[in-house]
Amino acid sequence: MNKEQAKQLIERTFEASFDKGKFTVFIENLLNKIDETKAFHARESYL
């Protein structure tokens, strides 16, 4: 990824409402590899 592509990825990820798909693509590019099986998934509390 070149500098311009990285800049566009950052803008698409952080200058809009949160989107899990966009954030996942950003993290994959940042870390080169992620293991989603070990991801933290917040549970909704039921009242």
Image: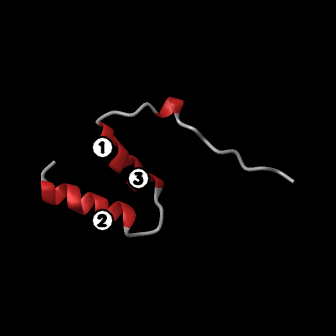
Residues marked 3 and 2 touching at CB (< 8 Å): no
Q: Which residue is mark 1?
A: 30
Q: Residue 39: image x %, image y %?
A: 53, 36
* Residue at the (28%, 44%) spot, across then down: 29
Is disc 1 surrounded by few (<14), some (14 to 19) or many (20+) residues within 10 Å?
A: few
* Residue at the (47%, 34%) spot, across then down: 36
Instruction: Identify residue type, mark 3.
Output: Phe
Q: Which residue is mark 2?
A: 11
Estimate the spatial distance between the alpha carbons at disc 3 and disc 1, rounded to whole Å.
Answer: 10 Å
Q: Quadrant of the C terminus?
A: bottom right
Instruction: Identify residue type, mark 1.
Output: Leu
Estimate the spatial distance between the alpha carbons at disc 3 and disc 2, rounded to whole Å.
Answer: 11 Å
Under circle 3, the secondary element is helix
Image quadrant in which you'd find residue 13: bottom left
Under circle 1, the secondary element is helix
Q: Which mark is residue 13?
A: none
> Is residue 23 toward the left or the right of residue 45 in the image?
left
Q: Which residue is mark 3?
A: 23
Question: Image height check: is 46 above or below 8?
Answer: above
